[in-house]
Image (cartoon, rainbow, N blue to C red):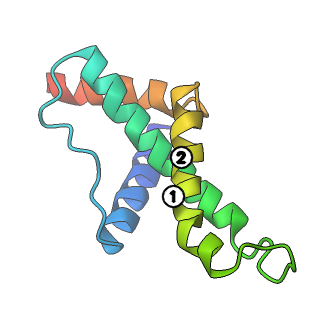
Amino acid sequence: MDNLLNMQMNQALAATQSRGQTAPDISGVRTEEQARAVAEEFEGFFIGQMLEAMFKGVGENNPLSGGSGENAFRGLLHEEYAKVMAESGGIGLSDKLTAEILRLQQE
């Protein structure tokens, strides 16, 4: 299971770097609260990526769509949805990430 998690984390980090985004910085994390905040931030980013893929192509040729205005702000809406979802428990990823961040800090 750890190998699968490591592979998925490496793929997620590579994907963010290829888009010019950076992974959360865990070098300054010293407490569990800081680790939890970084883990929730990453989970929010991950959920945002899932929402973006899920809504791709939905409602684009709809007479009630928001047109170019909707397209301009759709990414922000997905980010906000993801942030709220992560803060309210998310998909359980932040618990595992918090534990992993704390484990890495001990090494």
Figure disc tally: 2
- Image quadrant where one finds the C terminus: top left
Q: Is residue 37 left or right of residue 60?
A: left
Task: Please say if 48 is above or below 94.
Answer: below
Which label number is shown at residue 54?
none
Furthest residue toward right: 63
Report whether 66 appears left or right of 32. Answer: right
Q: Which residue is mark 2?
A: 80
Q: Residue at x 16, y 22 (%)?
A: 106
The residues bearing labels 1 and 2 have C-alpha atoms spaced at a distance of: 6 Å
Viewer-side residue, 91 vs 82: 82
Q: Quick check: 49 above or below 45?
A: below
When asked about the image quadrant of residue 91, the answer is top right
Give the number of the disc on residue 76: 1
In the image, residue 53 above or below residue 63 = above
Residue closest to the eye, 13 or 82: 82
Residue 93, position as x, y percentages in the image: 51, 34
- Element assignment for label 1: helix
- Give the image location of residue 43, x and y in percent: 47, 40
* Residue at x 70% of width, y 62% of height: 54
102 above or below 52?
Answer: above
Q: Tell me if mark 1 has few (under 14), some (14-19) or many (20+) residues whose alpha carbon lies within 10 angstroms of its own.
A: few
Q: Amino acid at mark 1?
A: Leu
**Amino acid under label 2?**
Glu
- Horizontal and vertical percent for residue 92? 57, 29
Q: Residue furthest top?
A: 32
- Of the pair 66 and 58, the residue shown nearer to us: 66
| Disc 2 crowd, CA 10 A, few/some/many (<14, 14-19, 20+) | some
Q: Quadrant of residue 49?
A: bottom right
**Helix or strand or loop: what does disc 2 sit on?**
helix
Assess whether mark 2 and mark 1 are in contact (beta carbons under 8 angstroms): yes
Residue at point 20%, 43% (across, down): 25
